[in-house]
Image (tube, helix red, strand yellow):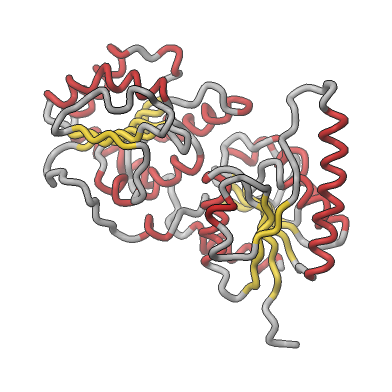
Amino acid sequence: MANELKKLLIAASGTGGHLFPALALAEQLPDYQIEWLGVPNRLENQLVPAQYPLNTIAIEGFQERFGLGTLGILLRLSSSIREVRQIIKEKNFQGVFSTGGYIAAPAIIAARSLGVPVILHESNALPGKVTRWLSGWCTSVALGFEYGAHYLPRTGTAYTGTPVRAQFRTQQKLDLPIPENVPLIAVVGGSQGAVAVNQLVRQCAIAWLDAGAWIVHLTGDNDPDAQSLQHPQYFAMPFYDNMAALFQRTNLAISRAGAGTLTELAVTHTPAILIPYPYAAEDHQVYNAAIFDSAGAGLVFRQAELTPELLQSKVLNLLHSPDLLQQMAQKAGKLGFPDSAERLADLVRQTL
């Protein structure tokens, strides 16, 4: 029938960095019938089913080197491809969208083997292995950072930025008792928290508080010393739901360098001290952080080289240089596309 909605399968799994951009895109596609492809017991099982039907397959990551486990992984990949092919055929999906990660491999291969178009979005400055291996199979490839095109063996990529959740696009209210005219530092370790960063910050925090700053410290839920520092200007909590409000109010963030977090910092014009996660796959957070560094939007330090004394002094220097912080904020804003979800939705419509 002419008025039937096109059917789109979204393959996004595992972390907020993969899921939130895909959810932001889905919100911009009310003219599509959307279902999800995920993995059992991952974050999508909490976020997706209330909004979209969730199909799950068994798949896992790819090892860095070939070894005894490689054959088993390849066998499971083959089985996963067959499962996705069956889902696409039975439900008559007319397109597949993925944000990369290991679930993208069976989704891309299955779709292309059936002649179904695939749109792939890569949020990191250094594209992941699956993106580098399979981007040439995709109908369209969208990039969160333009720099990522250097690593892809094809032309015709689109620079769309990375979509952010809807609340980042409008002014939000911070529901914490923090005065309006005080400098605010937000410490964000990523979705899992960052114990090493937490320990560094607690060693520096008293000097920043004495300088008049207030601190919101998101510790994650695996830090046994999370409540060891008590101060009326210091708020420690595992997580905070309204990250848009926090970043909009923040004068300086101290953060890991995941692509999703950097996109949110850019859209909210928030300067940052970035400490890339040292165990990220292929050190990709260093490449992300370098984008902020080269734009003048942030300072980057390797975790191994960052002492409490160095972090304390760098933050104090910035707190005492509000004009510099403002310049960094403006440069951060130039790295973000608030309309990235619309750009990506336009690409989907052009492709399908």
Which quadrant would residue 344 be assigned to in this image?
bottom right
As drawn, is 145 to the left or to the right of 249?
A: right
Q: Residue at x 42, y 56 (%)?
A: 338
Percent x, y for residue 311? 30, 18
Q: Quick one: quadrant of the C terminus?
A: bottom right
As drawn, is 104 to the left or to the right of 317?
A: right
What number of labels is visible?
0
As drawn, is 346 to the left or to the right of 169?
A: right
Q: Is residue 62 above or below residue 100?
A: above
- Closer to us: 237 or 349: 237
Q: Residue at x 77, y 51 (%)?
A: 108
Percent x, y for residue 174? 24, 51
Residue 4 visible within the image: yes
Percent x, y for residue 67? 83, 21
As drawn, is 302 to the left or to the right of 214?
A: right
Percent x, y for residue 218? 34, 35
- Closer to us: 102 or 46: 46
Q: Residue at x 75, y 57 (%)?
A: 139
- Closer to us: 336 or 5: 5
Which quadrant would residue 283 be assigned to in this image?
top right
Residue 252 visible within the image: no
